[in-house]
Amino acid sequence: MAEPLPVTDEDGSPLPRELRFEFHLQRKDETVSWQQLNAQALPLRDGDRVQLRASLAREAFIYVYWFDHAGKPQRLYPPRDIPLAGHRKSREVRVPPDAGAGAGTKWLQLQDMRGAETVLVGVAGTPRTAEDLRQIETTYQQVPVRLVPGPRLEPVAYPPLAERRERGVGEIVDSPKDGENPLRTFESVLRQHFDEYQGWVVVNE
């Protein structure tokens, strides 16, 4: 298994392990209320709306992905229509960019929700290349997600989420043991390219 990248910035200073990833869910028949993603909220359904928010204690390069049930990757941040050379460090990313509160807030509307979908945010102290991201995307497509039938949530994280729970992360089920984790090959690639990552496999059926 590949060793994780050193958790250092371009100047050699340590990056804090304080990534917080939020998944806000609004049902298709709701107009005001919303909830944080949790196992009780499953399954996700066509027409439901989501907002994603990643925040850090200090600036870093942030990448947000959604992999559908067929393994097809969608890079939500930075968007594919923005050259990677233009990607800049930030402390917070919202998807969509206008996600927030109030009447004008924007949401992503879900379509074709079935099987296992994976949403993921990765953080690096230095920018990832197009080849780095291509390796992540193709590896996920080659490793089928075979989990216990859902609906259920499976966390995907480095460092393990168990190390974070005292810092306020909750409503996430325990991860399977490493030897039972069908995403272990995918996660070994993630650890080559990201200092830290966090997300969920959302099993809808």
Image (cartoon, rainbow, N blue to C red):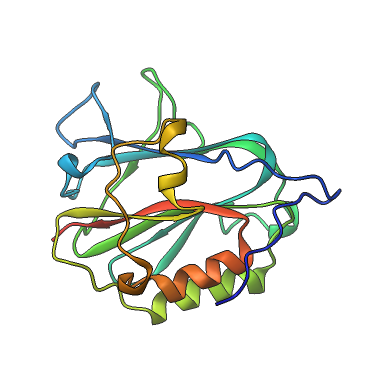
Which residue is drawn at the image coordinates 69% and 67% (left, top)? 129
Question: x, y (%) of residue 105?
Answer: 40, 26
Question: x, y (%) of residue 94?
Answer: 50, 37
**Left or right position of 43 against 93:** left
**Left or right position of 10 against 22:** right
In the image as oriented, which residue stretches furthest toward the bottom? 142
Which residue is drawn at the image coordinates 30% and 44% (left, top)? 172
Based on the displayed image, in which of its 4 quarters is residue 111 positioned? bottom left
Based on the displayed image, in which of its 4 quarters is residue 192 positioned? bottom right
Quarter of the picture containing the C terminus is bottom left
**Left or right position of 196 against 40:** right
In the image as oriented, which residue stretches furthest toward the right? 11
Which sits in the foreground, 32 or 90?
Answer: 90
Residue 19, placed above or below residue 148: above
Which residue is drawn at the image coordinates 72% and 46% (left, top)? 88
In the image as oriented, which residue stretches furthest toward the top? 102
Q: How many marks?
A: 0
Quarter of the picture containing the N terminus is bottom right
Question: x, y (%) of residue 108?
Answer: 35, 43
Question: x, y (%) of residue 167?
Answer: 47, 32
Which sits in the foreground, 12 or 89?
Answer: 12
Based on the displayed image, in which of its 4 quarters is residue 22 positioned? top left
Residue 21, placed above or below residue 112: above
**Left or right position of 103 against 34:** right
